[in-house]
Image (tube, helix red, strand yellow):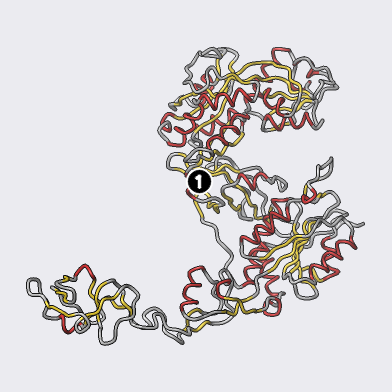
Amino acid sequence: MERNIYLHTVPLTQAVETLKAALDREALVGREDVDTQDAAGRVLAGPVFARYSSPTFHSAAMDGIAVRAKETFAAREGSPVRLRLGQGYAPVNTGHPLPAGFDAVVMIENVVQEGEDTVALEAPAFPMQHVRRIGEDIVATELLMPQGRRISAYDLGALLSAGIWQVEAFEPVRLAFIPTGDEVLDFMQRPEPKAGQVVESNSVMLCALARFWGLEARRVPPVPDNLEALEAAARQALDSDAHIVVIGAGSSAGSKDYTRTVMERVGRVLVHGVAAMPGKPSLLGVAQNGKLLVGAPGYPVSAVICFEELVRPLAAWLGRFDAPERAGLDVELTRKVPSKLGTEEFVRLAVGRVGQRWVATPLARGAGMITTLTRAQAMTRVPEQLEGLEAGATVRAELLSPMAELDRTLVIVGSHDNTLDLLANELMGLAEPVRMSSTHVGSMGGINALKGGLALCAGAHLFDPETGDFNFPFLAKYVPDQDITTVNLAIRHQGLILAKGNPKCIKGVADLAREDVRFINRQRGAGTRILLDHHLKTAGIKPEQVRGYDKEEFTHMAVAVNVLTGAADCGLGIYAAAKALGLDFVELARERYDLLIPTRFLDDPRIAALLAMVRSPEFQAKIRGQGGYETNLTGQIMRPGMGLEG
């Protein structure tokens, strides 16, 4: 089958306006009567006029006595006015009707009881004092709420008080999602994916987003890459009560991407391709019966952009409500963000406060990186007229997390270690939880972040062969002017991670020069990379002799997964990563992994919580339980020259 060809990509706003012009909103979304008690979140299709006044009678606003105000005018301190029960006053409680003939209420605190039926007042009352008048809140027949109002929980009280038992509202916008693909497995079957297969999850994620916005959303089981089957599923969804039908995946230019073909069979395509990354392959169209058709990309991050930037504003317009807006915050970028001219790019961010500054670390931008959705606390947009953003630039971020959560975020930048994941979980279990934002850019990347004031803490394990010491020679060279407190997290065992059973019989660094050995490396600036280079130099092996030296990963677990899946025969990493995946391991070195903390932050509650956790015997036992760690120095403040022995 021929590949699809993108139409001219259009800006997101233009795509939305194109569909608004093509859709008949009045015909598509109907009106219905809704019981008031069930109407929260619905949008009024017509005005609401009050049937009752509120209150419907003059009522006491305080506990006390009802009086005739003119009979109290002579009351003075030391010269009270005395009133008799039934003739001059009547007891009332808050909310009681004002007895006939009385026009004011005196609070019980200001009443002196002189006998069973006599009271004395030492201050006058004025007419209608402490009285809620008829119609003070609502007057019968007045406009209570206009059409187009989205009903809140508070509105329900006002509606019922005014005698409104039903309201006319627009239908809730309903969405049907059709996941597609031969490679996707229905999660409902709890499958175990094989090579080339993935568990289908976009439909659940996107339907949950739609429900959060106030839509009714449902999904169907995945449909295979079969044109007739997909067309049948689309027609069935269009025949249902859904106003929006979304076909998930199949919107790109592959030979089995049938979404556009199906949309053209059941309607017409108006947009194929938007000037946005991710999200470019998004499709928009109108079905023959007037319903909105959407082709969402298959990669999860692209699909989310399609939903948030195209489906959300169109659904809000159909439903006559405002699309929810996110709070904004000015943040400083920790590193450069390249971008392509002519395309609006969406970048997800990890955000935290460092001193008085809000800093943001751009997360990986792969359209299939679903974990960037779970790790991100904010998002920024690179305008289409810019070729990226520079490190240190201040940008406006849309918050994906509450401000209170951001203020509790501990920003750690530097080398990856499995213990950081353990630490992140334990900190979130505290009575006052601390969220850890850990960015893996290598030990030198962590030191550079401290240099720029972009982190509260850095993780590093840099070994200096000349002194035999860790981290301090590098701190002296790169951040000589900063006062940094170095606290040990653990001593860990580094070595070669190998396939189970070691089928290639790899025994040490010398084997990395073999033609039949494929290696997976860590990124430049990583302490593990520096350790590798030291061992290669000692063994007299040049980097170009190592097959795969230029193939990089950013974490120990990523290295281990490459070995597990056969993408590489070995890689350098920590024993804990090998143990976690049941791989073999050849130890090369013991090294000290330290936390580098600017001394001025030691009093920060987040750092205090971090250090308290690291120094607890229970947490140290969990570190050792991972395998390949020693904790005899854990929690101690390090000094130059202490090496591995402290």
| Camera-nearest residue between 525 and 51 | 51
Q: Residue at x 60, y 22 (%)?
A: 624
Q: Quadrant of the N terminus?
A: bottom right
Q: Residue at x 16, y 75 (%)?
A: 119
In the drawing, does residue 622 fall left or right of residue 535?
left
In the drawing, does residue 554 fall left or right of residue 255?
left
| Camera-nearest residue between 159 and 517 | 159
Q: Residue furthest front?
A: 116
* Residue picked out by circle 1: 406
Where's residue 172, x and y in %? 65, 71
| Camera-nearest residue between 292 and 15 | 292
Where's residue 243, x and y in %? 72, 70
* Amino acid type, callout 1: Leu
| Local secondary structure at mark 1 | helix
Q: Residue at x 52, y 69 (%)?
A: 152
Above or below: residue 557 compared with residue 35? above
Q: Residue 54's quadrant in the figure? A: bottom left
